Image: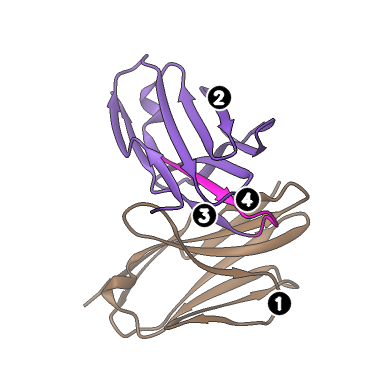
Amino acid sequence: DADVTQTPRNRITKTGKRIMLECSQTKGHDRMYWYRQDPGLGLQLIYYSFDVKDINKGEISDGYSVSRQAQAKFSLSLESAIPNQTALYFCATSDPIGVSLFFGPGTRLTVL
Amino acid sequence: EDKVVQSPLSLVVHEGDTVTLNCSYEVTNFRSLLWYKQEKKAPTFLFMLTSSGIEKKSGRLSSILDKKELFSILNITATQTGDSAIYLCAVISGGYQKVTFGIGTKLQVIP
């Protein structure tokens, strides 16, 4: 089984809808991240969490919110989706020393 | 502001060629540099580098870090079409282990 899983893997939605992307991990890591990837812009950090009570904004948090329901679960929400949020979204975890990063398989989100 | 710059942005080579991908960085309190390969979806881990001058190897891929000059290179020898991908460089830095990614180098290997 994959160490970091994301659901859904693909989603098409309409402008204004609320969307939740879910991430689960079995690596036992405290640190979890949400990134989005756009062609030509690389990976940009949306939110990160170092434990259940510690959630921080990344570079591009506007229009997004997160919930850390448990050590193993970190969800990303788009409260009111807009077309420029169309992107590939990755969840990641990092080891306790913080020197490596492990990615989930990604969610391709299209907002029409 | 932390910065990771990769070059070239894209590269087209023939099978059998050797390629060198570059990654330079400016960060506060460097902890590690990571290389990833991204094909269709999620980046897959290649190397983690923390010490200068120690080459990491995995088959035809190798990488080395220069912490004095603040750069790393990823070498791929005898390239194959399966090496076609985006190669991402990331640097982990600071007390909060901030991760900064480069934009990536798109490598295309043609037969």
On the same chain, marks 3 and 4? The answer is: no
> Label 3 vs label 4: CA separation?
12 Å
**Labels 3 and 1 touching (C-beta < 8 A):** no
Q: Is residue A13 above or below residue A70?
A: above
Please identify, in this view, whether the residue under mark 3 or under mark 2 is nearer the observer.
3
Q: What stretch is highlighted in magenta?
A: A89-99
For label 4, the residue is: B99
> Label 1 vs label 2: CA separation?
38 Å
For label 1, the residue is: B52
Residue B45, image x, y percentages: 48, 63
Q: Is residue A2 above or below residue B11?
A: above
Amino acid type indicated by mark 4? Val
For label 2, the residue is: A62
Label 3: how many Cα within 10 Å (few below 14, some 14–19, many 20+) = many
Please identify, in this view, whether the residue under mark 3 or under mark 1 is nearer the observer.
3
Amino acid type indicated by mark 3? Phe
Q: Colour of chain A?
A: purple
Q: Is residue B71 left or right of residue B30?
A: left
Which structural element holds mark 1? loop
> Label 3 vs label 1: CA separation?
23 Å
